[in-house]
Image: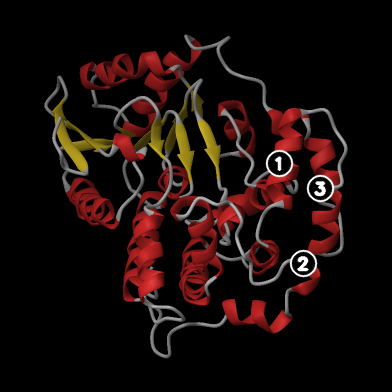
Amino acid sequence: MSDMPVIFEELATRDGHILGVATLNAPKALNALSLEMIELLYPKFLEWQDNDKVVAVWLQGAGDKAFCAGGDIVQLYNSMVEHPGGPNPYAEKFFTDEYRLDHLIHTYSKPFILWGNGIVMGGGLGLTAGASHRVVTESSRIAMPEITIGLYPDVGGSYFLNRMPGRSGLYLGLTGANINAADALFVGLADRFITHDRRDAVMDELLSVSWADSAEHIVSSVLRQHERHSEGHQPESNVRKHFDLIQQLTDADDIAGVVDNITSLSTDDKWLSRTSGALAAGSPTAMHLIMRQLQVTRQMSLAEVFRAELSLSVQAANKGEFAEGIRALLIDKDRTPKWHAATLDDVDAQWIDGFFESPWDGEHPLADL
């Protein structure tokens, strides 16, 4: 296989059209999204969008373990160490280009098929959320675990978490909970469940059908047929199962009340216990950021959300909490982060306010979205 970080293929359909296929090609790193990948994907997707012969785009990850396990945060960490307090040119470019790519997928004018097999986390979920046809499989493992590294669910998380049933988005954002394919379907992060062993058959059928009809209808018809053949393999949805309890746990007047409800829950359920434990070990600053970010973006458009997230992410890269979280989890791996504040009560309101100030005096880098 090619050593290029993204492999592009233009597969000819039986009637002379093209299916554009992009494969994230870093399986040893679980296809972590690098700046180089982003810089390759964005212009190619624009090119395919403008090419009348291309009827649909397919995005997948190399290997069977992951579609994309998140952004390449080690490189981000190095940039934060190099530029403590900011400004941080690399972080600004990475987040700007990443969010521009995510926004393009959300607004893509052709069917965009996302094969979300295996691990789909962080930046991988940013690539997934906006696709028009999001497929999950029996091994899909989806999460936005930024609470563990002193960040918040970005890459459009402020948009899609706010649109989940009830307050399940707030719960998933705060706890970084791992969810499965059935959960993804329930909360609106996926459209179809198809077993992974049918991937090649799905693609072969897309290449053999006639594209004389609506491309959207054709893709939906093919995926629907294979979804029917996958019935019986779908796991149980933990979010659906515990939905009423999640509503109770997130019903509080402030972040302290929500966190106390979740972390003080006594249960024998393994999924609930893991989510509670992850929140208890997370960054108190991130807890405040997540709650406030979801509140301030609740009525924002998609473009406004990406602009708000870019400002917040760049500030997070400048202020140290994000870097410390990465250090403890992935660099030194001591799992003992020295958070800016040890508890929620220790978090200063002015400290949080600073995250929501624009890092730029002039025009916002995503003003054109």
Answer above or below: position of 49 versus 231: below
- Disc 2 crowd rating (10 Å Cα; few below 14, some 14-19, many 20+) is some
Q: Residue at x 22, y 21 (%)?
A: 207
Point out which mark residue 262 bears. 3
Amino acid type indicated by mark 2: Leu
Residue 161 % position (x, y): 62, 51
Q: Position of residue 369 (x, y in %)?
A: 38, 68
In the foreground, 303 or 313: 313
Q: Which residue is mark 2?
A: 344
| Residue contact at pointers 1 and 3, CB within 8 angstroms | yes
User: For the residues marked 1 and 2, what is the alpha-carbon distance in whole angstroms?
Assistant: 18 Å
* Quarter holding residue 258: bottom right
* Nearer to me, 233 or 36: 36
Amino acid carrying label 1: it is Thr
Helix or strand or loop: what does disc 2 sit on?
helix
For marks 1 and 2, the one nearer the N-term is 1
- Check residue 275 in the rendering and tell me which mark sits there, or answer none: 1
Asked if marks 3 and 2 touch (Cβ < 8 Å), the reply is no
